[in-house]
Image: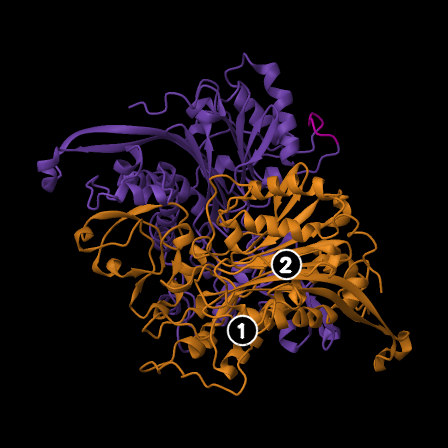
Chain colours: A purple, B orange
Amino acid sequence: MSADWFRRRFLPRGPLPAPRPPRPRASPVPYRRPRFLRGSGSSSCTADASRRPDARPVRSPVRGRSLPWNAGYAEIINAEKSEFNEDQAACGKLCIRRCEFGIEEDQEWLTLCSEEFLTGHYWALFDGHGGPAAAILAANTLHSCLRRQLEAVVEGMVATQPPMHLSGRCICPSDPQFVEEKGIRTEDLVIGALESAFQECDEVIGRELEASGQVGGCTALVAVSLKGKLYVANAGDSRAILVRRDEVRPLSSEFTPETERQRIQQLAFIFPELLAGEFTRLEFPRRLKGDDLGQKVLFRDHHMSGWSYKCVEKSDLKYPLIHGQGRQARLLGTLAVSRGLGDHQLRVLDTNIQLKPFLLSVPQVTVLDVDQLEPQEEDVVVMATDGLWDVLSNEQVARLVRSFLPGNREDPHRFSELAKMLIRSTQGTDDSPIQDGQVSYDDVSVFVIPLHHQGQGHSSH
Amino acid sequence: MSADWFRRRFLPRGPLPAPRPPRPRASPVPYRRPRFLRGSGSSSCTADASRRPDARPVRSPVRGRSLPWNAGYAEIINAEKSEFNEDQAACGKLCIRRCEFGIEEDQEWLTLCSEEFLTGHYWALFDGHGGPAAAILAANTLHSCLRRQLEAVVEGMVATQPPMHLSGRCICPSDPQFVEEKGIRTEDLVIGALESAFQECDEVIGRELEASGQVGGCTALVAVSLKGKLYVANAGDSRAILVRRDEVRPLSSEFTPETERQRIQQLAFIFPELLAGEFTRLEFPRRLKGDDLGQKVLFRDHHMSGWSYKCVEKSDLKYPLIHGQGRQARLLGTLAVSRGLGDHQLRVLDTNIQLKPFLLSVPQVTVLDVDQLEPQEEDVVVMATDGLWDVLSNEQVARLVRSFLPGNREDPHRFSELAKMLIRSTQGTDDSPIQDGQVSYDDVSVFVIPLHHQGQGHSSH
């Protein structure tokens, strides 16, 4: 944001206007579970039937329905934390339209000669908060944004090296060399498209929520396969890992008020008005109180990775911008994540202080070269919302994967069975394979994506 | 910087004032070579004698003079790029005063009962630009800033765990638990002190240069040993690596307009006034020209790790905020580094556009646990300015270290001999051990710090 734009958007002059009252329209975003769960036991799509029974069922796609790459999926609703399951999921085939332009002399008219498709696949998890609407909108929308963004650069993607000019026309003879020197590869265009798609989707969600008078936000974790590579884009605290026989590799990192402390503190330093005099930007080991006044206590500010001591003043007693540790860490006492989609209207309870300026919708993207990996029979990517990772470590999940898959080679539905087993491992039930494990009371959603046989034949039309 | 402070400091309203003319005082910062080079051949300290002869000599401390930990040092002046050697170096013992306070009932008076010292060692390289003054000031000053910053927190450092309150007084019974939960360790206080010391030194340099009517800036790479650990703090493009028999480990990373692109572009996005309409914030594979207008070309902005295409407008033809690749990359067409000390008055040639807002003085700090490493006879840390690393890779330096040391065990001066040999390897001379090597025409300065026997007995008084 530019300072001027930022001030116009977030820092109105004069007394702050009251938050706009929700302006309900005829059709709020309807609650639903992912489409690919249709027909799976208790998987009716109406809100009423989705209310949990006493024993929470683990749900997965009905046998016979196959997801892209024969991926597995399972989910469980939280233990009465919210009426709805605020997690959402989506997956499908991505068909990216390629236009072939005419020969050189026709270029002025960009004659459309033929059309073919670059295909990929898409799996996404959205973990909602403040209501299910943002996650549902994201599940309905993000793949379309991504398709549009990829179509806008697809001519660049199908070339051996992205051309400096999308038209392929060379204006300087050394243009290819400039691109080469910058090290720009096809995968950078996909990364750029993912970054733009997340931002576009965030704008759509903002408009839709405002129009329907609804609120809320969600994290987004997306895996996209394209041309032999798997792109994992993450904004929030979900996680994807690669599990192989001898390797566990994180494919994402989490974005929380703790992991993004310096970015968030720095924004509050540049625009102190965002805290409206109600919060302190500084971090202390605990919230300070009157007895601490005048004492030198541990603190850190936006420019510090280390810690130092400062003499406590009265303004240091305010509520901290980022408070609490680990799972309990909150931004402005409100939000546990620092990236995601939505939350355009979110304010600190009983104040006019907005959360959105501190949130980023742009994801971090990791690229896995599946072709180069030469994946083996039981190599998988596990994607899950934080409910799983709060209870199971990467290594525990890897052990469960390795113990489950070899004995179930014949079951075509084995990756969903594995996803279900992972979820049951978080429920502290008698049949849980993890002894003395912790229990997750959160919504949990899991994709298991097998990599074997899938990296090949990537550019089918 | 806060937006208001920032505007007051960098964005004067109305027509921009002309740059303040230098206000010379009686004594500009005198040129000198590091003190520990005194008596070493051509090492006279006057400016005249420092002018290079036709064959540039490699200089190192005179035999018999030992540096902390018996470290080695060597330097060479550039090939007529500047009149002076703009690199500077410093090393020495750090004595940090510890005050022991009286027993509980006397605390109100903070009775000073005794004084003892926590000792460490310090090695620093500064690579100047725009004149030698900033690097000389940094070599004269930074260790004092660091001592002062460490003395301000030393009571916290000598405790098993840093206490929440510097006085050691416990205001909440669970204060130690809060500190524990945040994972705050002694080394975080040293990191905090290094971060503060760099900033304090930057302010001193700003004041001193203004008072003496001089200009310039420098990078800073500092290694500090304290309580069995080695802290490497870096702001700029110098580099430190650990070389062991079976391992080469980078102990720093470089800060250049390329590596800090997103931070720099984002600042220009928030405060577009900083570019005064003369530069474009966006990155393109090359500088655009009239023929590119209306074409879709590769670009990226501050929020992007990937690349995308945009339609070229007239404003995209401006000179880029960051231009060129690798060694040639420049910030505002002027500076090759994005962190360092000084440059308070630096402006883009023939304009009023300032560089300082884009520069950070805060270093990145890496911690090496020397005690835990159990260093062997030939384990060393090599610190050098960019002149060395432009020509030799980490692996080449490691090979040279491993080939040199075993045959020279008896020479007490062997680490300086190794530093000299490393420098000669950059000069393309007949006796260079690197065949077909590139040649460095830059100033080069090298410390070689042996780790064996040094991690032990760290807290002598």
Between B60 and A147, the one nearer to me in the picture? B60
Give the image location of residue A226, x and y in percent: 38, 31
Image x and y of residue B447, in percent: 63, 55
**Segment tinted magenta in the rendering:** A430-435
Lateral position of residue B419 relative to residue A33, left or right: right
Q: Which residue is mark 1?
A: B47
Hey, which quadrant is residue B278 in on the image? bottom left
Give the amino acid at mark 1: Ala
Q: Nearer the viewer, residue B339 or A298?
A: B339
Percent position of residue B61, x then y? 67, 60
Mark 1 vs 2: CB contact within 8 A:
no
Q: Nearer the viewer, residue A5 or A83?
A: A5
Magenta stretch holds residue B418: no
Residue on which the image places disc 2? B60
Res. B423 mark: none
Residue occupying the far top of the picture: A410
Q: Chain of mark 1?
A: B
Nearest the eye: B191 or A285: B191
Residue B345 is left or right of residue A119, and the answer is: right
Give whichever of discs 1 and 2 has the lower sequence position: 1
Q: Secondary structure at mark 1?
A: helix
- Which secondary structure, mark 2? loop
